[in-house]
Image (tube, rainbow, N blue to C red):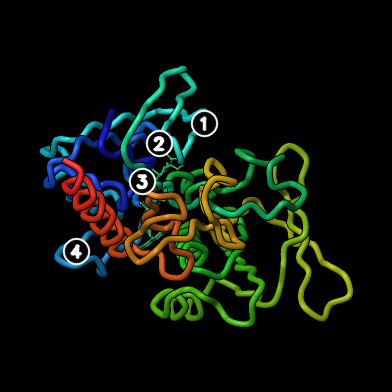
Amino acid sequence: MHDVLIIGAGPASLSAALWCDELGLDTLILEQHAQVGGQLLSIYNPIRNYPGVNANNGRELLERFSERTDEAEFDLWTNVEIASVDLKAKRVVLRSGEELQSISIVIATGVRRRQLGIPGETEFAGRGIIESPTRDREKFAGLDVCVIGGGDAAAENALLLAEVCPTVTLVHRSKSLKARREFVEQLHGHHCITVFPESVVTRILGNDKVEAVEILRKDALKPFQMALGGVAIRAGVEPNSELFRGQVELDEQGYVSVTSQQETSVENVFAIGDVSNPLAPTISGASGAGATAAKVIAARLSGHR
Ligand SMILES: Cc1cc2nc3c(=O)[nH]c(=O)nc-3n(C[C@H](O)[C@H](O)[C@H](O)COP(=O)(O)OP(=O)(O)OC[C@H]3O[C@@H](n4cnc5c(N)ncnc54)[C@H](O)[C@@H]3O)c2cc1C
């Protein structure tokens, strides 16, 4: 029987676990991937908005986190596949058959990239769909590419791709970009980036690999095709909350609803970080929520011991 089971190992979880360690709680983190860090692993821009640390990218910030988390005494299992969760009973069953029991559960599963559901999106995975502009830099160098989306991730991807691609077309649905000002300024001044506002990509086309996209611009009667060699899809995110659907209150977008103490609609089940924060997802927000949940859990447990 653990005091706290935390699902996910991004910044929210690591912050909660540090506090749980400091407060003397027996804590186990379950992470589906081999590596901890969550979205930090895919941040390539400098992080200048996390107090006390200036990091050149997410991995560098994660290293700074690890300096402290490596010393702390909580258990961390990676490559874990959760088969089912019973939030009321505080029981987690792993695909391996192992059953875990806890006094409290913390949902820290973050968000993932939103899928568009357009033809070609899954068919061309690994064959022209750009997963990471940094990792796939060499593969797409010299090719014309398109980025779908208008937020920070889309803008950052367009700027990174523009370092090696002759043309980058940024296609987004809204009138104006939602990305931070710093990115928008760089995008608009860039000689090889073209921005198509109020437009959507309706199909990704090709034979063995991506060869074109079909773009529909607002007020146009028909879509047009644009030849290119790569597409990055960065059209927002959606919460990783399916595992908990039907057991806990979710908002209409699937984000877990929480109180100011980060507690969900089920007693002693908490949700922290992006999975419960549709409006202002940040590393500092996630860390703060983790600290809040840990302190509330510790206070409750001390009343029962
Ligand atoms: C490109 C980019 C740039 C960004 N730049 C900034 C910035 O400059 N400043 C800033 O403050 N924020 C920035 N962010 C946002 C920031 O990274 C997030 O707000 C933060 O990582 C949220 O932390 P989290 O722990 O809630 O979730 P995540 O980081 O999403 O971590 C969730 C973890 O849960 C795991 N998980 C999910 N489902 C399961 C499951 N079923 N079982 C086990 N584990 C599971 C995931 O694998 C992941 O490791 C950026 C994000 C991106 C993508």
Residue of label 2: 90
Question: Which numbered marker is on residue 106?
Answer: 3
Residue 282: image quadrant is bottom left
Q: Nearer the viewer, residue 270 or 56?
A: 270
How far apart marks 1 and 3 lie (CA) works out to 15 Å
In the rendered image, the quadrant that contains the N terminus is top left
Q: Secondary structure at mark 2?
A: loop
User: Mark 2 and mark 3: span between their CA atoms?
Assistant: 10 Å
Judge left or right: residue 180 versus residue 294: right
In the image, residue 222 lies at what x, y percent?
88, 70
Name the residue rendered at 77%, 78% in the picture: 218
Separation of disc 4 and disc 2 at Cα? 38 Å
Quarter of the image where one finds residue 237: bottom right
Numbered mark located on residue 93 in the image = none
Q: CA distance from mark 4 to mark 1?
A: 39 Å
Q: Residue at x 19, y 63 (%)?
A: 54
User: Residue 196 appears at what percent x and percent y?
Assistant: 66, 74
Question: Can residue 86 be spotted in the picture?
Answer: yes
Which is nearer the N-term, disc 4 or disc 3? Answer: 4
Q: Which of pointers 1 and 3 lies earlier in the amino acid sequence?
A: 1
